[in-house]
Amino acid sequence: MEKFNTYVEANAERFIEELKEFCRQPSIAAQGIGLEEMAELVRARLDKLGAEVRLIPVDDGPPVVYGELGDGQRTLLIYDHYDVQPPDPLDLWEFEPFDPQVREGKIYARGVADNKGNLLARVQAVEAYRATLGELPLKVKWVIEGEEEVGSPHLASFAAEHAALLTADGCLWEAGQKDESERPTISLGLKGIMYLELKAHGAKSDLHSALATIVPNPAWRLVWALSTLKDENDNILVDGLMDHVAEPTAAEMGMLAAIPFEEEKMRARFGIPHFIRGLTGVEALKKHLFEPTCTICGFKAGYIEEGAKTVLPSTAMVKLDFRLVPNLEPDLVVRLLRQHLDRRGFADIEVVPTHGGHSAKTPFDAPIVKAAIAAVHTVYGQDPVVYPLMAGSGPMYPLTQALGTPAFSTGIGYAGSSAHAPNENIRLKDYFEGIRFVGELIRRFGT
């Protein structure tokens, strides 16, 4: 791969300029900003690469960019997304979020870590491979969507409709990072998710707070309902939900025991003295990866601006997400939550599901995983830390597991990448290592 590496070095400046171009284009799925323009940028870059590429429309959403290139006995599916999170809060950014800046070996921009850097590094790796080693030893299929950051509401139906198009022997998923001690990581699956809103209603309009003596307050109503969902030790109390949570297998516990968990560094980075329940070591990892969550993501009621306004709110709303482990399905969570609230006298509280997704898992001995581990060892000079699944979520199940395709996730991020947060960034060194990794993965998986 010496010629490959030399090509990457010779084209490093151009590769970074391409990445800046991608990051300059806002593509905020939550606000519907710039998605069509970003899809066209991705389409044009794959076309320039020589891929057969097209934009596949989805109902009421931005198009999926689909591309194919190469030939061989095996097919590698590459999944990425071109949408990004909103940049708020803007006042915490050191640079304009859509004006990429390189400082001290890092490039800062919204979406540079999640997911435009990974997306483009993989495209540039294919370019470098063909320019130095000849035609690809396998077929590459790209699926690049524009709604991942809002729960991929159309990807399951897209995958079902185009199942024949998506057949593959392995999948490289969207992202990953080095851990707190600079070790590359690989994840063999992810949690599912159910995102929803709870809404409470009171009077037909906001009222003077003096009327709180006789008029119900929907904000209190919601607080009382929320207090039944978890206890002070972070145990989820939704009736029947934890009955569906399976204990990790002996093999999975063995994988957890092999993970060098840098918990002190993690707590220091988060600025917290301890984890929930005071958990540490393998038990903390077990909770992190194999327990579901029930998280208040946001609460809205009444007046929350500066100063005082004595108001009795007419409505209250909370956004919740449940991260789901295997055997917990999104629809099941909604049903259990509705029944739980009804039993406690909260039938008046509205449950509004917004999006959901299944969990997914890949066997450790899958050929794509073996190729990935070998490629990491070659490029990084060490074996990866292998996680049985990641604590985050994504549409892996409909695109891979439901179609019988084993998948793994890794990427160009690091512990300080600040994805979804102000000052999102990647290190240039990690970016070019990521390009080299994809080249090595193609070589090993294809031959």
Image (spheres, helix red, strand yellow):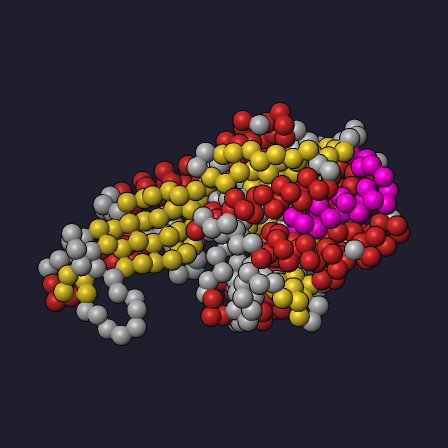
Q: Nearer the viewer, residue 330 or 417?
A: 417
Give x and y (percent) for residue 207. 15, 61
- Residue at the extreme top of the image, as rendered: 164
Q: Is residue 218 left or right of residue 171?
A: left
| Residue at figure coordinates x 38%, y 46% from the top left | 196
Q: Quadrant of the C terminus?
A: top right
- Residue at the extreme bottom of the image, as rendered: 307
Q: From the viewer's perspective, is residue 61 above or below residue 96?
A: above
Residue 34 inside the magenta-drawn segment = no
Q: Is residue 4 left or right of residue 45?
A: right
Give x and y (percent) for residue 92. 49, 70
Q: Nearer the viewer, residue 197 or 263?
A: 197
Residue 128 inside the magenta-drawn segment = yes
Residue range (magenta): 118-138
| Residue at figure coordinates x 56%, y 54% from the top left | 25
- Answer with the quarter of the image where residue 144 lies: top right
Give x and y (percent) for residue 138. 78, 34
Give x and y (percent) for residue 302. 25, 62
| Residue at figure coordinates x 43%, y 54% from the top left | 295
Q: Nearer the viewer, residue 11 or 94?
A: 11
Q: From the viewer's perspective, is residue 113 above or below residue 58?
A: below
Q: Is residue 201 left or right of residue 280?
A: left
Q: Which is the main secondary structure of the residues drawn in magenta? A: helix
Residue 58 appears in the figure: yes
Number of numbered markers: 0
Residue 407 appears in the figure: no
Q: Nearer the viewer, residue 35 or 148?
A: 35
- Answer with the quarter of the image where residue 313 lies: bottom left
- Residue at the extreme right of the image, as rendered: 2
| Residue at figure coordinates x 72%, y 55% from the top left | 15
